Amino acid sequence: MKVFKFGGASVNSIERIQNVANILQSFSSEKILIVISAIGKTTNALEKVAEAFFEGEKEKALELFTAIKNEHLETAKQLLQQNVQRANDRLLDIFTEVEWLLHDRPVREFDYYYDQIVCTGELLSTAIISLYLNDQQIANTWIDVRDIFRTDNNFRDANIDWAFTEEQVNEQVLPLFDETNFVITQGFIGATADNESTTLGREGSDYTAAIFANMLDAETQTIWKDVEGVMNADPKLFPAAQLISELNYKEVIEMAYYGAQVIHPKTIKPLQNKDIPLLVKCFLNKDLPGTIIHNSKVNNLPPIIVIKTNQVLLQLNSKDYSFVGEHAVGKLYQLLEAQNMRPNLTQNAAISFVCCVDNKPEKIEKIAAAASDMFDVQLQKDLTLLTVRHYNNGILEELIADKKLLIKQQTIDTVQALVSAM
């Protein structure tokens, strides 16, 4: 048993979907659970639908969703020969889920509507690709992961009910491999006990695959990407970025914690718990060796650069020059937790506390308003957080040469700098 995950970039065109079929044909004798993300930028487009709906712009939301519908219908038309009508029927069922909602008006929090709308991206992509593979004589079974993954109602960052989900994997998923070698499902999504759709956090398809790998006792999990493997920096920003052929779980967790987009932060634990190797391979050339991630020590790693843009610095100053002690800091962490936000960098001084977070305006406004009871609160936006693991003396200076340094923190292994443009 293996688990494959194909991200949005690997299915963002007719040619790339056809390439997925070519990759799977070379594994036709193996049993593989295949997790597939939404096509290309569909998730971003669905986010705009959710935002328009929540802001009361129903016609705009419907117009944006119609464009997404037409794109997927056209993709199905171009790909399919025998299963066009089946695809249209299945897609129509998925479209209807959203359109019923869009004709209503929002009465719940944004995150709830976000999940009901955005979850459809993966349902649409997998419906089309599953039928295309069957067209190509690559037999597979399609399942709706919402029937398998039970979660709580922490919308946009839902937590898995492991016991219930594992029971469903054993009862519903495993028997399918007696019928076909390939089972296709969605990443990123689940459902509550009330059958309301949830998402597991942005880019959560890696985590979905890891959960399946754990529960199926998979031999390996493979993430197929548009790069050679795990690189020491984003090759789009750093053309000289180099492949890291081997990593261990600990290093990847550190990279994910600091914001590397290569692998979802929650992915490693389910794999590490059962010592399942994670492979990161290039879908453009399946014969490249890629990166293997395992439980053994790895030495002589190059500097690993992680850049998080669109950061906000919360500057909290004591109103009466009293010390900012444990109680006040604890209160701030409670405010962050209430908004499901995690600080990316913090620094405590005698009468002040600073905290760097991702820019989520609605949540930051709530935190700032609540914190203003205790502190004078200032916000500084449009910042970038640079992190370098296994740094050398010159690399940080090179990265911040044309920027204004606001905060710098340094340990033996890692240096971080919060900067703004000059």
Image (cartoon, grey):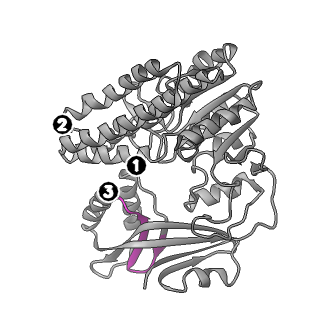
Chain part drawn in magenta: 346-360
Q: Nearer the viewer, mark 3 or mark 1?
A: 1
Position in image of residue 289 (x %, y %)? 79, 50
* Position of residue 290 in the picture relative to residue 39 (left or right): right
In the rendered image, is residue 156 in sight?
yes
Residue at 68% x, 56% y: name it: 230
What amino acid type is highlighted by mark number 2? Arg
For disc 3, the marked residue is 363
Tell which of 50 and 228 is nearer to you: 228
Tell which of 384 and 288 is nearer to you: 288
Q: CA distance from mark 3 to mark 2?
A: 22 Å
What amino acid type is highlighted by mark number 3? Lys
For disc 1, the marked residue is 44
Q: Earlier in the sequence, mark 3 or mark 1?
A: 1
What amino acid type is highlighted by mark number 1? Asn
Q: Quadrant of residue 239?
A: bottom right
